[in-house]
Image (cartoon, rainbow, N blue to C red):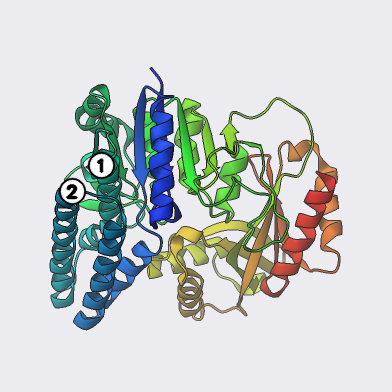
Amino acid sequence: MSTLVMKFGGSSVGTTTALSQVLSIVLQEKENWSQLVLVASALEGVTDALIEAAHLAHLGNQRGYRRIVANLRTRHLALIEELPFGATERTALQADIDRLLFDMLDIYQSMSQSKAARAAVDASIGVGEKLSTRIIAALLRQNGLRSVAIDTTSLIVTDDVHGDATPNIPLTRAKIAQNLLPLLERGIIPVVTGFIGATAAGEPTTLGRGGSDYTASVLGVCVNATEIWMWTDVDGIMTADPRDVEGARVIADLSYDEVAELAYFGARVLHARMIGPLRQQQIPLRVKNVFKPQQIGTLIAEKETSRARTLKAVTSISGLGISAEQGLLRAPVNQLIGEALHAAGQMQADVMIASQSAAHSFTCLLIPTSAGPDAIHTTRQALEDHLVATPSNWRIQPITIITVISNQLQAWPQAAAQVLLMLGDIRVLALALGTSNCSLSLVIEMRDAEEGLARIHRHIISSG
């Protein structure tokens, strides 16, 4: 029996045109697969709006969070009005949306009156997925498909790290066997909320930014999926982010290791943590364009056996560079940095490169994209506040980490030489070859990021 898990991102569900494409794809694939499972993100921009509303609620700004909720209600109801629903289905959907939003207002009211637990925050910012899945499931039913929306609070069991939870696969597998597999056996297409889960005690959690990808991966593993398809608004995984570099091209295939490194080092097309479960169970993953479903996209599968040496992609991510006079330190550099991050609650930063000599030290912190747009500033502030008391001449500066992706880099030293040659006069603060043997990272000053990325990408295209 073949099972396909399809995840639709926010740009794939936010308009009537996009939802029409979703419907067409599901109708087509229903004929090709024994079972389908759909995972949906919130409409584009909705989760960010909900995060802002939660922040305003913490500040007691009732007018601010009510305005955001009113705008979200208007947006979702307008989308429903534009879709070809019957009167009964439309009325039921409107009532469902109002119920979810009123419940969320109650949470925000509680936040404004007292310091709410992180579980309450997660419960509020996960509502976007609940809204989108109900619309998609209703659209499928309207077109003759048996479908139901399911909240993953009843499926995915996580730890209690609110805002960046990790699923417990054995407990999740048991929940899925109880609440999801019977639906598939009856020919029902479940439309599952991405991004959210719950602890074993039932407290709502979220899986971090881009967590709907992670949801699709976990579901795929637990239902023994044949394949997983990620539907987005680009043609596949590209040689560089087309928003940053001109002339980016689709990559036909990547290994699990290569795409995991791409995601970790800033590529925004996939969640970095989703690859691990797929690699363990050898489930192929395909990234496709929802508006061009006939195109094959990018296939991610087991590492290719070909020994062809080709630079496949380049990506970039922001970070912080920390330098100090080593002779004046009373504790190892990494220990001091770890203490600073822990004290400020900024543990999402990763030490990527650490270098020490007799006189100096340099440490590079990578700030994951999942940490949010303010993470660089807040992490820098936390470090400066903590390290100011240490007897050393610290210097903290924003940096960019540019990473080149290819297989077998350890056996291909010429690749590093070529990349450094392409950078020319751009100063390299540090470099590292990843332990996965498929990533080469170079730390440069932020002011040189755009030019450095463009130079390396031109080399990838010309040599590929």
**Image quadrant where residue 66 sits:** bottom left
Vertical position of residue 337 compared to residue 447: above or below: above
Kindly identify which residue carries mark 2. 89
Kindly identify which residue carries mark 1. 142
Are discs 2 and 1 less than 8 Å apart at CB? yes
Q: Is residue 158 visible?
A: no
Residue 410 in the image, given as x and y percentages of width and height? 75, 39
In the picture provided, is 183 more to the left or to the right than 213? left
Q: Residues within 10 Å of mark 2 (few under 14, many from 20)?
A: some
Nearest the camera: 318 or 82?
82
In the picture provided, is 18 more to the left or to the right than 313? left
Residue 385 in the image, given as x and y percentages of width and height? 46, 79
Nearest the camera: 29 or 129?
29
How far apart, in angstroms, are the residues tagged by discs 2 and 1? Answer: 8 Å
Residue 125 in the image, given as x and y percentages of width and height? 28, 61
**Image quadrant where residue 34 sits:** top left
